Amino acid sequence: MKLDEAQLQQFDDDGFIFVPDLFTAEEVAVLKGEIPGIFAQRRPEVIREKTGDVVRTAFATHTYNDVYRRFISHPRILEPAQQLLGGEVYIHQFKLNGKAAFDGDVWQWHQDYGVWQRDDDMPEPRAMNLAVFLDPVTEFNGPLYIVPKSHKAGVLEAGHDVETTSYPLWTLDQQTVANLVEKGGIAAPKGPPGSGFFFHGTLVHGSPPNMSPWNRLIVYVTYNRTDNAIRRFQRPEYIAHRDFTPLSVLPNDCLLT
Ligand code: SIN
Ligand code: MN
């Protein structure tokens, strides 16, 4: 699937594109059907919240689950990523973020590229995220908050937060966020399962805790250009991948066959 000129322009101007109906109900059912088996596993890739025995993030599922191995090369997400980044791409990171009912914890304000640069020595912000909602995302269940246009601010000063949640993150200070929000406001992409959301590596984002009785499962794929591969291997391989092989696009029905 190719993005049109207006979508490319929006990514450039605002730092994100929201695509309703990116995946069908049938495809979402295939993706969700794998989740109980994945979330039941006790393995280092599957990180639980500080409170509650629920999954915060399951990393690198595409390396051991065949449905998600096909998903990352689906033409409706891989082709736009190649287009937006202007070249061949590999997977830098893959995660299923559970944001479980009642226990799903906060993600503090941050830029993903701020983490990839500081922790993984990724040379340039030529990497981006694709998010696909696997549950309905509403105002109640901890939607992603983004600051439109903040990707244009470049890499911002950040502090290493190893306390707040079960996963360390380079987070932004309140004044920096307030200044950016004054210019760009805050948006919270919401929609039914199957909705897709592409966003720039330097877009400022975070999400509030989920105090609702509804789960908010989102799958995130981070694509990076093969000529922008990371140079520091301090984080586990399942968090920052070292396989820089370019991905090839699979057929449109690859989740259903
Ligand atoms: C992230 O920023 O990496 C995750 C945020 C979320 O899933 O709410
Ligand atoms: Mn993030």
Image: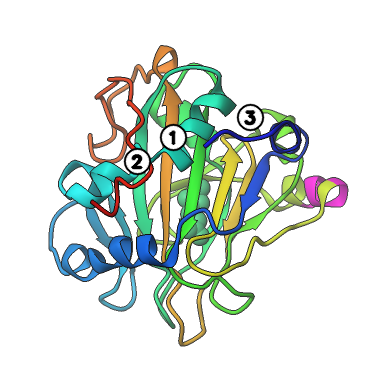
Residue behind mark 3: 155
Sooner in the amino-acid sequence: mark 1 or mark 2: 2
Determine the residue located farthest toward the top in the rendered image: 227
Residue in front for this viewpoint, 8 or 235? 8
Q: Secondary structure at mark 2?
A: loop
Q: Residues within 10 Å of mark 3 (few under 14, many from 20)?
A: some
- Looking at the rendered structure, the kind of residue marked 2 is Ile
Q: Position of residue 186 (x, y in %)?
A: 75, 57
- Packing grade of label 1 (10 A; few <14, some 14-19, many >=20) is many
* Residue at image coords 13%, 64%: 41
Q: Are marks 1 and 2 in contact (CB under 8 Å)?
A: yes
Amino acid beneath label 3: Val
The answer to which of 90 and 141 lies nearer the viewer is 90
Amino acid type at mark 1:
Leu
Q: Report the span colored magenta.
A: 178-183
Residue 125 pos. (x, y %): 56, 24
SS at badge 3? loop
**Vertical arrangement, residue 123 with respect to residue 100, above or below:** above
Q: In which quadrant of the rendered view does residue 89 lie?
A: top left
Is 179 part of what is drawn in magenta? yes
* CA–CA distance in space, label 3 to label 2: 27 Å
Q: Is residue 19 left or right of residue 249?
A: right
Asked if residue 118 shows in the view, the reply is no
Q: Which mark is residue 78?
A: 1
